[in-house]
Amino acid sequence: MESEAPEALEKRVKERRIGLPELPNAVDGEVVLRFAPNPNGPLTLGHSRGVIINSQYAEMYNGKMILRFDDTDTKIKRPDLKAYDWIIQDFTWLSGKEPDLILEASARMPEYLTHANEFIAANHMYVCTCTAEDFRELRVAKSECPCRANTAEKNSELWRQMNDSDGSLVEGDAVVRVRTGMDNKNPALRDWPAWRIQRAPHPKVGEKYRVWPLLDFQSAVEDHLQGVTHIIRGKDLMDSTRKQKLLYDMVGWKYPETLYWGRVKVHEFGGFSTSQMKKDIQSGQFSGWDDPRLPTISALRRRGYDAGAMTKFWIDMGLTQKDISVPMSTLNSLNAKAVNAEAPRLTFVREPVSIRLDLGDGFESPAKVTLPIHPEHLDKGVREWPLGEGVIKVKIAKEDFTSREERRLKDFADIGIKHQKTIHGWESEIIRTERVGNTPIIHWLPSNMAKPAVLLLEEEGELIAAEGLLEINDYPVGTVVQLERMGFARIESNEIMIWTHS
RNA sequence: GCUCGCGUGGUGUAGUUCGGCCCAUCAUUGCGGGCUCUCAUCCCGUUGACCCGGGUUCGAAUCCCGGCGCGAGCACCA
């Protein structure tokens, strides 16, 4: 291989970067990434960034992607047994493949305990029996607490008492701290807590353990055990990185490369608080985790959003540390592009008004109306609406009925809207079937092609079931269709559709 | 209070490491128009930004100094 010309090294040509930036120190085939949610609910749009960006990188570098359940809190953010499966489902749907490895922190406790024993024996950690309030003061004052002077033997003994089921130490009496130094200029890093006592039974392992590691310890040990090479996480965890790095340095481990992103809000939803949503569902404000008004992955999937569109959405967002607030219209635009080509067209008439069309003397009515399933993909075939003999009964939307002028029934005929009522109902007449001029087009259905259906949509925070008539079709449940002149919707059942977006 | 991070059009983003290719990229939104027997999709056009003040330099979005603004951590949550 020839050595590179020196001038080629002098300056990179500036080019616009497309896609995700390169990962620092990444070796193809050896990258290990992880996504580590707390299983206290299903995934939200906010989580999807973690799933997607990490998965994308794993794919870019032919690396490994771990899904890890950080379920070591039995009290404040208690794990939800159902959430484990929900998250695996959401993860798989978002990334297009199953994780290479699934780990549950609660099942990894023996490993964590082993390391705790070791670190306490090595004097890297000590048991602290100060109250949280007292330690807070010590932390501010940069002064060491009395417990810090205990010997490793004494600490091991106290640690045994913390673990002991009939021990004298109960919840709140003691924590294990990492001996980082009380003089660290960053107060967040001063002898940070690694273990605490929690009596609440764990949904997965019951009352097997009395002590549970905090995130900073559990995650630090597990990342090392799994050989994680790159951590990509929120910048709110920057001090977490620093805490963990202090521990890594003590025990001689190599800390992974770490990248951060800022906080994300969506204009329409605000933040993504799983706990808040859980409360609102319990109080009956929402019907469930897949309530179309919620920013959960299950709700978005139910509404017909495309995982590829979400992927592009997050890739476009990149890895900046800026706190951002994005409008749903950005995602919607990407989603429309993703689903439009495949979405069959259907007609939905909201608040239908029945009209009898008078064919007029000598007027020849066509036997049927033929319209494409997709105007840009004619190979997808056609829809055929047979028209009855004699008088034709059609349905049009109430909002289109307000006019008294001519309107064109799309792909069929110009009619005069007369607001003339007879014993049979509203009557109008067909003026011509040829397309002449630019008579405003409205959509419609012949009554024999219409079936009652509801369209679920959100209006000002309320979930509305808009009643109407849907064109008879046999698309399977889950099909994302485009309702002509309205927008996209997903077929949820024979008579229910869920609104996606326009 | 201490510590850390971030500031490019309405929104998001590229460019900032290594100053000139940047009178600043791309997307989205808004506005205008075209295509279309859908108010969808698509196409074209257009408005619109380097937080502020100094400094270094022939030249600064990019380097230095000082402000200001926003956010996060300092939990026995993750």
Image (cartoon, coloured by chain):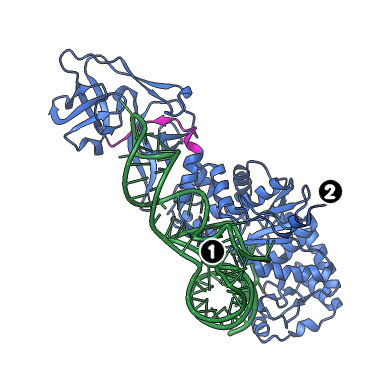
Chain colours: A blue, B green
Q: Chain of mark 2?
A: A
| Residue located at (56% from left, 64% from top) | A322
Closest to the observer, A300 or A418: A418
Decide which of tag 1 and tag 2 comes sooner along the chain: 2
Q: Which residues are magenta?
A: A339-351
Q: Position of residue A299 (x, y in %)?
A: 50, 46
Closest to the observer, A25 or A150: A25
Say left or right for A124 vs A383.
right
Question: Split into 4 quadrants, where in the image is the C terminus of chain A?
Answer: top left
| Residue located at (54% from left, 52% from top) | A45
Say left or right for A6 vs A444.
right
Task: Kindly identify the amino acid type of the residue bearing the numbered disc 2.
Answer: Glu
| Residue located at (82% from left, 81% from top) | A150
All told, the count of numbered labels is 2
Image height of A387 relative to A303, above or below = above
Mark 1 secondary-structure assignment: loop
Residue labelled with disc 2: A2
Q: Position of residue A279 (x, y in %)?
A: 49, 58
Task: Kindly identify the amino acid type of the residue bearing the numbered disc 1.
Answer: Asp
Image height of B14 relative to A94, above or below = below
Give the Cα separation between the discs numbered 1 and 2.
46 Å
Closest to the observer, A194 or A475: A475
Quadrant in the picture for residue A407: top left
